[in-house]
Image: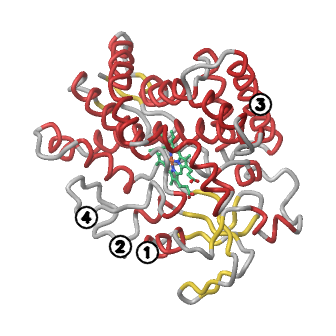
Amino acid sequence: MELPGGVVVWAIARHDTLQELLADPRVGKNPQLWTAFTEGRLPEGWPLLNFVTVPGMITVDGEDHRRLRGLVTQAFTPRRVAELRPAVESRTRALLDDLAGLEGPFDLREHFAYPLPMQVIGELLGLPPKQQDELHELSDTLVSSSATPAAAIAAQRGLQALLASVVEAKRAEPGDDLTTDLIAARESGDRLSEQELVGTLLLMLVAGHETTLNLITNAVRALLSHPEQLRLVLDGEQPWSAVVEETLRYDSPVGQFPLRYATEDIPVGDVVIRRGEALLASYASAGRDAAHYPDADRFDITRQPNRHLSLGHGPHFCLGSGLARMEAETALRYLFDRFPGIALAEGPAPEPIGSFISNSVRTLRVTV
Ligand code: HEM
């Protein structure tokens, strides 16, 4: 398929093929493996270039990947995620209190689905609350495919500058957060370069909130448009986790994830992906693959088994999956408990967000 800017890649849209290629040792994530990149054939100011070259665990393989991923995994173990639950619950309750005060229809995405994961990842990373909205706007531009090349580059620089200033502030005054831990790791040896430190924070910030924001939005939208499914949870016949898993499959919060590269010729069905060519993981399409899921276009929280790929697969499997699932389940449970009369507001269907990576709607107007 052709990406914005006319760059041609292989979109891997079938579930089984995607599952195989995500775990295939002949496929890597380092852009140095991509011939179009190393030969300088990408268009000037290509908007996705920043994303596919950001220094961090998503653009490296093997030992480098283990080193960078290993520095943050301890913050996301099941025990650490369980410890975060009370804080997530109290933030959820506080946000719902604010919603109760809003008059008429409002945008649930802006007032609930966004601030919850942003506050959680902000606290984990030790980001100043006052800068969180600015960080979100820059991060939105970074994952947007409609941003002009100049805007995408400015957003990347702006994010890096802001995060570098957070690192400086934490160096001067360490806190109980992941940024402080990463600074300590950097200073205790050659485990992390300064660029990788800022790149890792950038990745954690973007991955830690844009995705969960979409998951909560997409789940509420699906439930409100399928009242019989919502009924199953409210009657206790299905757990909230079933809603989360089915939303991940049905309306994958990460639509597509750029990019991977073939390190040798790889035959796939009737075609051969040549060494040095790029692959795009098309998670949203894989979730609707009729060859893998019976009645794939139906939102059905009783679906069994439901082993989707929407949190990735293989060595780059989502590091924050436990946190994302816990946040989304908490958000949904508390939201429907607090506002049993919640409904979609009347009006035209919401527009999709203009992003190549992120998959959701721009707004989700509801009444409570
Ligand atoms: C609904 C929420 C989420 C979804 C759908 C999601 C999805 C994904 C997917 C599909 C990947 C694999 C990307 C690829 O290589 O193709 C991934 C990787 C990753 N995710 Fe998530 N994610 C979510 C939440 C989070 C959260 C909350 C965090 C952190 C706090 C996080 C951190 C990461 C990181 C660091 C990686 C890169 C792992 C690596 O390259 O080794 N994600 N995520």
Q: Earlier in the sequence, mark 4 or mark 3?
A: 3
- Name which residue lies at 76% across and 68% down: 34
Mark 2: secondary structure: loop
| Residue plotted at (11% across, 40% down) | 236
Q: Which mark is residue 16?
A: 1
**Disc 4, SS:** loop
User: As drawn, is 122 to the left or to the right of 94?
Assistant: right
**Residue sitting at 60 percent across and 39 percent down?**
206
Horizontal side, residue 267 vs residue 329: left or right: right
- Which picture quadrant has residue 172? top right
Give amino acid for label 2.
His
- Quadrant for residue 105, please give it: top left
- Please give the residue where the numbered disc 4 appears in the rendered image: 305
Indicate the secondary structure of the residue bearing disc 1: helix
Query: Which-is-in-front pick, marks 2 and 3?
Result: 3
Q: Spatial distance from mark 2 to mark 3, Cα to Cα?
A: 42 Å
Alpha carbons under labels 1 and 3: distance apart: 39 Å
Badge 2: residue crowd in 10 Å (few <14, some 14–19, many ≥20): some
Q: Which residue is mark 3?
A: 158
Sequence order check, earlier mark of 1 and 3: 1
Amino acid type at mark 4: Pro
Question: Does label 4 or label 1 sit earlier along the sequence?
Answer: 1
Residue 292's disc is: 2
> Contact, CB < 8 Å: mark 2 with mark 1?
yes
Q: CA distance from mark 4 to mark 2?
A: 11 Å
Q: Amino acid at mark 1?
A: Asp
Q: Furthest-top residue in view? A: 101
* Secondary element at image label 3: helix
* Callout 4 crowding tier (Cα within 10 Å): few <14, some 14–19, many ≥20: few
Residue at far bottom of view: 270
